[in-house]
Image: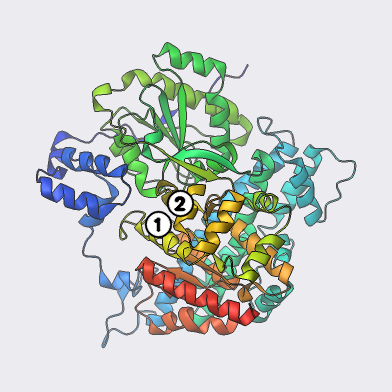
Amino acid sequence: MAEEPKPQLIRGRIDVCELDRARMSLLNPQLIEQKRESRTIDENAKPLLELTMREGIETVWDRFEMQQPPCKYCESGLSCARCAMGPCRIIPPHRIRGVCGADADLIVARNLLDMIATGAAAHSDHGRDIAETLYLFGQGKAEDYGIADPEKLEILCTEYGIAVTGKTPKQLAAELGLAMLEEYGMVKNTLAFLNRAPKATREMWDQAGITPRGIDREVVDSMHRVQMGVGADYTNMLLQGLRCGLSDGWGGSMIGTEVSDVLFGTPTINKSKVNLAVLKADEVNISVHGHNPMLSEMVVKAIRDPEMQALAQKNGAKGINLVGLCCTGNELLMRKGIPMSGNHLNQELVIATGALEAMIVDYQCIFPSLPRTASCYHTLVISTSSKATIPGSYFFDFKAENAYLTAKAIVRMAVENYKNRNPQRVLIPGAPVEVMAGFSNEAIKKALGGSFKPLIDLIAAGKIRGAVGIVGCNNPKIRHDFGHVTLAQELIKKNILCVETGCAAIASGKAGLLQPEAASLAGDDLRAVCESLGIPPVLHMGSCVDNSRILVLAAGLANALNVPIHKLPIAGAAPEWYSQKAVSIGGYFVASGVFTVLGVMPKIGGSPAVVSLLTEGLKGAVNASFAVEPDPARAAGLIVNHIEQKRTGLGI
């Protein structure tokens, strides 16, 4: 039998000295109370926030305060450090061009295109990892994985023009995996999933010149245009941004979602629990954090291994409790009902409970400072991706070929750390909240009797006025979870169904909006619909790559009505976004014809021309645009007005 791998400590252990903590600690109870209330609406997070402030344990909110005030040129997109002739800043009336001659419009557009390309690369590389795992399984090189949804595998093969008759699942996996990996380059010059969009939407893309040609192709094209001496017209730059975003939403992210369903199971409606109270005082607590389900699925298998369960009891624990964080957690919640400990801004607070033996991370949305936080406790931070090694973490080089053996070694390390927990420092506040999750498009169709027609009929009858995808991260600029929860509450009052992913979905879960009982908070018509179906008015559709599920839902509704997506009574929103990935998501929502409201202003204020293009000019190209509204109640008003206009346009 192969030997379990050993970890490598990256750059040595990080220790936070007592002097550092003394500098950070607050002694004024009134100030602590004020900060606690202003930072979050998550009631379970508040006692831990108070603890971190008293004990001088640095959090994201502290670092945000340290960075104030921000550079106004960076904030408005008017700074450029792209070449050695700079750095440059546009400061009217005299500094109106950079050294290369780029004006404010071009510098802002360059910076925004860079963000979109970075976000698209992140999502799409995630998708590549999943597609490669499917291919390796088909080649017989990733035997720890299997095909959990063979029916979907055959459906996808047919969609890709791959004959399925007489072939084994392994053969189909190899052919489909290769076909998907080919879409990252220029072999095909198109993406198969684009055909899911209505014909009129695809024609709109062709006319605007933004139909994606390949996933990596659009990222590379975008980065090429950002280079000095290439892109010079801000409009041309931003249209490429939309094309790059489309290659993510209808390409890399959609591949990641669909292949994850094939490998790990298409989500079905399930019940679980959420918030920091899902940790257990008498069990080994392990959190999985990041975005890639390849690792977390193996960790689920490893914690159920009788050998690991016996080891936990030998070390004095009653069992092993696995909890999720961010989108890796969302993947497990959707498919396995694994409880979620929180979203993006909860990640340090999970450690601050003092009850976490190990935080296993893969990539994306992981604070590089987590080992500093962990050094204040017994918690081990275990990194697993060669793309995201973290100083102070214990690194296992996780690969599909050695997946289970590596996962088992990681779980063993966590279990053996239980004995190092200090029971006097454990603080698990409150009680967990029940949630209903698992709303894949397949699950939604099943709940509706097998098609989207009942949903279309309800929308046509006005029982559901429309639907809104609320997505994105948390951002310390916005009171934690306030933007997500308030927007959802305001929309469901107006009989608008909300579909959510990522950190937004977990915010709603913590607030009780992912329970069927939350129907009582909705308008009369939506409440009646939810009560008849036994579902919440806010549906959890998955992780951030699963925003592609929202695209598929929109396309399904549009195809059934024989209209382009932009004519539907739908909208998108990202009330607390922070990441480049969110900019890419916004790009492919708008490029697909979905009006999208942002709660945080992108770094574009330095160019009125760019602002005008994104909020008005794009309507002429893709029949949709962005809006920015930090107040979620007012954002709801914008969305309601938009949806009612779309209903009028459809004559309903």
- Residue 343: x and y in percent read 41, 47
Dot 1 and dot 2 residues touching (CB under 8 Å) = yes
Depth check, front residue: 437 or 9: 437
Residue at 61% x, 82% y is 649
The C terminus - image quarter:
bottom right
Residue 6 at least partly seen? no
- Identified at 49% across, 70% down, the residue is 596
On the rendered structure, is 164 left or right of 543?
Answer: right
* Outermost residue to the left: 28
Above or below, 317 relative to 464: above
Camera-side residue: 187 or 543? 543
Q: Which colour scheme is used?
A: rainbow
Residue 56 at least partly seen = yes
Q: In 3D space, how far apart are the residues under numbered discs 1 and 2 (Cα atoms)?
A: 8 Å
Q: Image check: 256 left or right of 607?
A: right
From the viewer's side, name the closer residue of 145 and 476. 476
Determine the residue located farthest toward the bottom in the rendered image: 93
Q: How would you rate the neighbour count of disc 1 (Cα within 10 Å): few for under 14, some for 14-19, many for 20 or more?
A: many
Name of the residue lying farthest toward the right: 166
Secondary structure at badge 1 equals: helix
Residue 513's disc number: 2
Q: Measured from the top left, where is residue 191 in percent x and y?
A: 70, 62
Assign the N terminus to one quadrant of the image.
Answer: top right
Q: Earlier in the sequence, mark 1 or mark 2?
A: 1
Residue 485, disc: 1
Left or right for 141, reference 124: right
Three-letter amino acid code of the residue under disc 1: Val
Image coords of residue 45 (percent x, y): 30, 43
Q: State the residue lying farthest toward the top.
A: 314
